[in-house]
Image (cartoon, rainbow, N blue to C red):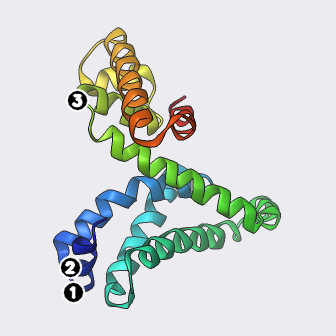
Amino acid sequence: MTNETFAQFILGDENAFKTIFNEYYPSLVAFARRFLPDESAQDVAQDAFVQLWNRHHEFQNPDTLKSWLFTAIKNHCLNLLRNNDTEKRYLESLTETDFEDHIMDMEVYILLYKTIDNLPDHYRTAIRLSLNGYSLEEIAMEMSVTIDAVKAYKKRGKEMLRKNMQQLFGTTLTVAALLLLG
């Protein structure tokens, strides 16, 4: 998020809010999925953005906004988990280090999604659907192509991601991000 986008958001600009939403929503859903099923993760992320909009005037800088979003997601997920006895044991085993590790993973997701956004349409669509848990068959149906075409799009897309990310972020981060693609 640019400083200009942040400044406009603080003033209540809806377009700036949409920009922030589009930038962080996929990462926040992915973060929430570590704790909750997909539908619940999407609901938690959407709730966080509603709260964010209601508090738009309270943030001092883009970093506090980002930190607030991830903390809001974590707290909302933990509150939901507290309602289930089986998951409550898991909740009690979480440590602050686990949370920090998840934040680092989300940083990688943010960079990955930004790089994916620059791929050609078919590659971007195939990789995004794959990240959202779609099978090869489901992706093929969604894109109205063959399974072999989906495999080719994913393969070429990953090659382009590897090349682009390596130039921008170096080898270590590239390897970590591409592991998320499976």
Picture quadrant where residue 115 is located = top left
Label 1 neighbourhood size at 10 Å, few (<14), some (14-19), many (20+)?
A: few
State the image coordinates of residue 129 (x, y, percent, origin top left). Answer: 38, 34
Secondary structure found at label 2: helix
Q: Quadrant of the N terminus?
A: bottom left
Query: Tags 1 and 2 in contact by the CB under 8 Å rule?
Result: yes
Q: Residue furthest top?
A: 148
| Screen quadrant of the C terminus | top right
- Find residue 8 and name its label: 2
Asked which secondary structure carries label 1, the reply is loop
Which residue position is annotated with label 3? 120
Looking at the image, tell me whether mark 2 or mark 3 is earlier in sequence order: 2
Residue 72: x and y, percent?
52, 74
- Left or right: 182 in relation to 84: left
Q: Are marks 2 and 3 in contact (CB under 8 Å)?
A: no
Q: Please indicate whether residue 57 sits to the left or right of residue 178 in the image.
A: left
- For badge 2, the amino acid type reads Gln
Residue receiving disc 1: 11
Secondary structure beneath disc 3? loop
- Residue 51 vertical position relative to residue 121 in the rendered view, above or below: below
The answer, for residue 36, to whether it is visible in the render is no
Give the camera-side residue of 168 and 126: 168
Q: Position of residue 150 (x, y in %)?
A: 35, 18
Q: Amino acid at mark 1?
A: Leu
Task: Residue at 39% x, 35% y: name it.
Answer: 167
Q: Residues within 10 Å of mark 2 (few under 14, many from 20)?
A: some
Q: Nearer the viewer, residue 4 or 75?
A: 4
Tell me the CA gap for discs 1 and 2: 5 Å
